[in-house]
Amino acid sequence: MSKDHLKNKVILTVATTGAVTRREDTPYLPQSPQEIADEVSKCYQAGAAIAHIHVREDDGTPSMNIDKFRETVALIRERCDIVINLTSSGGIGLDEDDRIRPIVELVPELATFDAGTMNWRHETVFDNNPKFLERLGSEMVNFGVKPEIEVFDAGMLYNALHYIKKGMIKEPMHVQFVLGAPGGIAATIENLVFLKGLLPENTTWSAFGIGRMSVPIMMTTIAMGGHIRVGMEDNIFIKKGVLAKSNVEFVEQAKRLVAEIGKELATPDEAREILSLTSVIKSK
Ligand code: ZN
């Protein structure tokens, strides 16, 4: 079926929490399942179509605790029908079985697939070794969970193409370019144009820049026909030196920029259609 009626629609993902941002950085970070669900619901009302979810332990430590995921997903589902995208990293150095568990037990519509190992913030290694990626990809195919292929550097895109060839990632592929993570490719307009040029046809894609480059990368991404992501996982300042009091402020800002360029935010159902999620089991 033609998707022409959707060509003016921009999918906005909100990443409310992530694994790196701490309460010491911003007191407004949602951390508990209740706080995350309330924040996601408000962002949905403001125009977000996808919620990218991480969870934390009660003390704020990044976690792949299945009970926290289960509770968070259930509370979101009580509130709205936003597309749920669960992290499969959860943070750095977490157990591989725990990283896969939410995919097989909660069957989200989308989950991240970090397509390669990298040095992380000049401190440690973000381990996405080939054996793990093969397992992760296979479970996603088994359970009909669409991977959001996170690309922190150009080589990761070529890894993803390898897994497509092996059948561990199905086409059409959906790619999320992460620009500006220390250890990955820098957040520049030139890098975004280069990365986008590497994508095979029929690929849907999104991009974001971490920190102060988030708005320039977002504007360029919208202009280039990509989808976008905002939230405290990636950036905590709504303008220079001013903390956002809620993720909603980022959603509203993105909505304004999308409107200025003559486009509209996609609803969750439009996002499902654009990303070909319609045949996938919806998160319970
Ligand atoms: Zn994440």
Image (cartoon, rainbow, N blue to C red):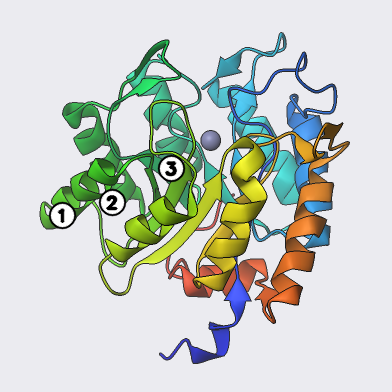
- Circles 1 and 3: CB atoms closer than 8 Å: no
Kind of residue indicated by mark 1:
Gly
- Asked if 266 appears above or below 237 in the picture, the reply is below
Which type of secondary structure does the marked residue at label 2 adopt?
A: helix
Q: Which residue is mark 1?
A: 167
* Percent position of residue 58, x then y: 72, 12
Which type of secondary structure does the marked residue at label 1 adopt?
A: loop
Q: Which residue is mark 2?
A: 141
Give whichever of 3, 120 is nearer the camera.
120
Callout 1: CB less than 8 Å from ligand 1: no
Asked if residue 110 lies left or right of residue 253, the reply is left
* Percent position of residue 254, x then y: 73, 59
Q: Is residue 194 visible?
A: yes
Image mark for residue 156: none
Image mark for residue 112: 3
Asked if residue 106 lies left or right of residue 22, the reply is left
Kind of residue indicated by mark 3:
Thr
* Percent position of residue 26, x then y: 80, 23
Callout 3: CB less than 8 Å from ligand 1: yes
